[in-house]
Image (cartoon, helix red, strand yellow):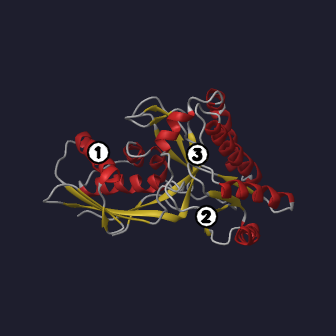
């Protein structure tokens, strides 16, 4: 009997921003993420007698978003030599297309639901590879805590693994939702355009060094080093976007204000760091003792901002 599968979203602290293979979604660089407890997707697959259907938050989807799901399911069916029309039911507890990696939990949950529906016995490593075919970042949402996605060179070697699923680090991520509008340029489009930047190759060359430094920071339980590296890596990614030919940015005016506020808080002795994915919304990394001060500061500047305090989330699981 098919089961509802839950996968939590993750935020990359060392970013994935560029594909070596579009079809297999092989990355040009390795990445490292934090799985979040507050953002997740629940997905169940049932048989259908009227063709494929995709329901998101109880609303049937059409167009590009539905086609992406159907194309992915067909790819998995061909891989496992199984057939049949499917109805997918997903509930997404992540703002979609707003830079909070909604696709990471969405496709991890979909991969898990597919394997549950067809009663496939797969390892988490294999499930990570399957999730990657839908969304690169989904490969990391198979695991809780800190996860590493090694870039690999082919379908079998590009997968994520758990670095530490039950971290002891005092680390909180405040998701600051400044803008609820879907981004105008998709992550896929942004990745392609970013490679025209003269800074892209130098950044790519730094990947192994930055990955090693971040892994060391985690193993040493060094919040300061983790925060500094995460902020640097995010800044490098967005500098590449700005210097692409033509240049582009996911930033809005409030994004810049938020970055400045983080710097002001640090100058006042409130240790915190930002990270930003492909969207206008800022995530602030801090320790428990500073959650209240950071939250109050953002509320005072951004009256309508929605702020969610997240910590480490679990890996993929079945709910029923």
Residue 303: x, y in percent? 67, 72
Residue located 33% across and 65% down the image: 4
Residue 137: x, y in percent? 48, 47
Horizontal side, residue 28 vs residue 214: left or right: left
Identify the disc placed on residue 174.
none
Identify whether 157 is placed above or below 184: above
**Reading the chain from its start, which is encountered first: label 1 or label 2?**
1
Q: Residues within 10 Å of mark 3 (few under 14, many from 20)?
A: many
Q: Distance of mark 3 from mark 2, alpha carbons?
A: 16 Å
Identify whether 202 is placed above or below 144: above
Q: Distance of mark 1 from mark 2, alpha carbons?
A: 33 Å
Q: Distance of mark 1 from mark 3, alpha carbons?
A: 27 Å
User: Would you say residue 169 is visible in this rendering?
Assistant: no
Horizontal side, residue 118 vs residue 106: left or right: left
- Quarter of the image containing the N terminus? bottom left
Residue 189: x, y in percent? 48, 40
Residue located 76% across and 58% down the image: 262
Identify whether 319 is placed above or below 120: below
**Reading the chain from its start, which is encountered first: label 3 or label 2?**
3
Q: Nearer the viewer, residue 10 or 280?
A: 280
Residue 317: x, y in percent? 41, 62
Spot the residue most to the left.
Answer: 49
Residue tagged by mark 3?
32
Q: Nearer the viewer, residue 218 or 206?
A: 206
Of tags 1 and 2, which is closer to the observer? 1
Residue tagged by mark 1?
71
**Reading the chain from its start, which is encountered first: label 1 or label 3?**
3
Q: Residues within 10 Å of mark 1 (few under 14, many from 20)?
A: few
């Amino acid at each position: 009997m098919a089961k509802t599968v839950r996968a939590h979203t993750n935020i990359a602290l060392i970013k994935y921003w560029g594909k070596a293979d579009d079809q297999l979604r092989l990355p040009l660089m390795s990445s490292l993420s934090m799985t979040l407890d507050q953002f997740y997707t629940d997905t169940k697959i049932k048989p259908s007698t009227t063709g494929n259907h995709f329901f998101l938050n109880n609303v049937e989807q059409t167009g590009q978003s539905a086609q992406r799901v159907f194309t992915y399911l067909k790819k998995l069916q061909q891989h496992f030599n199984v057939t049949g029309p499917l109805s997918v039911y997903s509930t997404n507890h992540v703002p979609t297309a707003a830079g909070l990696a909604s696709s990471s939990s969405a496709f991890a949950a979909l991969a898990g639901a597919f394997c549950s529906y067809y009663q496939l016995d797969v390892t988490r490593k294999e499930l990570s590879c399957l999730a990657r075919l839908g969304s690169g970042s989904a490969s990391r949402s198979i695991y809780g805590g800190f996860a590493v996605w090694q870039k690999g060179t082919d379908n079998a070697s590009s997968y994520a693994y758990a670095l530490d699923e039950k971290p002891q680090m005092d680390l909180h991520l405040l998701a600051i939702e400044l803008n609820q509008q879907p981004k105008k340029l998709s992550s896929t489009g942004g990745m392609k355009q970013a490679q025209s930047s003269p800074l892209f190759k130098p950044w790519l060359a730094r990947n192994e060094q930055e990955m090693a430094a971040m892994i060391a920071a985690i193993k040493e339980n060094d919040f300061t080093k983790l925060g500094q590296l995460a902020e640097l890596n995010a800044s490098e990614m967005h500098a590449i976007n700005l210097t692409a030919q033509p240049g582009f940015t996911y930033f809005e005016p409030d994004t810049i204000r938020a970055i400045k506020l983080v710097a002001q808080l640090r100058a006042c002795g409130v240790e915190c760091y930002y990270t930003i994915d492909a969207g206008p919304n800022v995530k602030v990394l801090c320790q428990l003792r500073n959650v209240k001060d950071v939250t109050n500061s953002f509320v005072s500047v951004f009256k309508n901002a929605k702020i969610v305090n997240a910590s480490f989330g679990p890996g993929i699981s079945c709910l029923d």
